Image (cartoon, grey):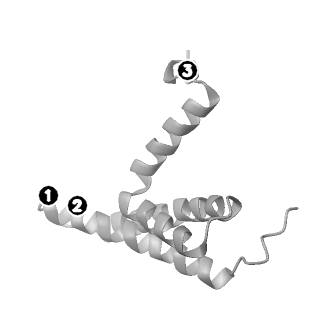
Amino acid sequence: MQKPPETFDVLIAILWILLGGYGGLMAYLMRSADANIKPTFWRAFLEFNAAVSLGTVVMLACTAMGWSTLWTGVIVSSVGWIGAKGVVAIIEALLFKRLGLTKDDVKEK
């Protein structure tokens, strides 16, 4: 199993992940306010946890690429604010391009 880099700080990682989750929560609340929709606890809980999950993956990717702690925080926070659904679509498009696939290649037949 690969060890994390020596500069990897667990407390900073937790801080960035929670900040990403907070960004996801705030984005949901802002979208709800803009649409004059009353936010629900369970949707807020879902948005927060989705942003935390994706923030964890992005934080690990930033660490693996050797990005600085501050840039990692910026990226993870931005990912949280954009929201899990939007970021997954971006990552999916990048992966399809990188692998040379189209959506037709992966559709069920």
Q: Are marks 3 and 1 in contact (CB under 8 Å)?
A: no
Outermost residue, right side: 1
Q: How far apart, in angstroms, are the residues tagged by discs 3 and 1? A: 35 Å
Outermost residue, top side: 109
Graded by Cα atoms within 10 Å as few (under 14), some (14 to 19) or many (20 or more), the crowding at tag 1 reads few
On residue 96, which mark appears?
none
The quadrant of the image that shows the C terminus is top right
Give how far across and how far down residue 17 sits, in percent.
54, 72
- In the rendered structure, the answer to whether residue 78 lies left or right of residue 94 reads left
12 or 53, nearer to the observer: 12
The quadrant of the image that shows the N terminus is bottom right
Q: Quarter of the image holding residue 15?
A: bottom right
Q: Are marks 1 and 2 in contact (CB under 8 Å)?
A: yes
Graded by Cα atoms within 10 Å as few (under 14), some (14 to 19) or many (20 or more), the crowding at tag 2 reads few
Q: Are marks 3 and 2 in contact (CB under 8 Å)?
A: no
Instruction: Kindly identify the amino acid type of the residue bearing the numbered disc 2.
Output: Arg
- In the rendered structure, the answer to whether residue 25 lies left or right of residue 30 reads right
Secondary structure type for disc 3: loop
Q: How far apart, in angstroms, are the residues tagged by discs 1 and 2? A: 6 Å
- In the rendered structure, the answer to whether residue 70 lies left or right of residue 2 reads left
On residue 35, which mark appears?
1
Secondary structure type for disc 2: helix
On residue 108, which mark appears?
3
Instruction: Kindly identify the amino acid type of the residue bearing the numbered disc 3.
Output: Glu
18 or 46, nearer to the observer: 18
Give how far across and how far down residue 20 sits, in percent.
46, 70
Q: Is residue 19 above or below residue 32?
A: below
Q: Earlier in the sequence, mark 3 or mark 2?
A: 2
Q: Which residue is mark 2?
A: 31
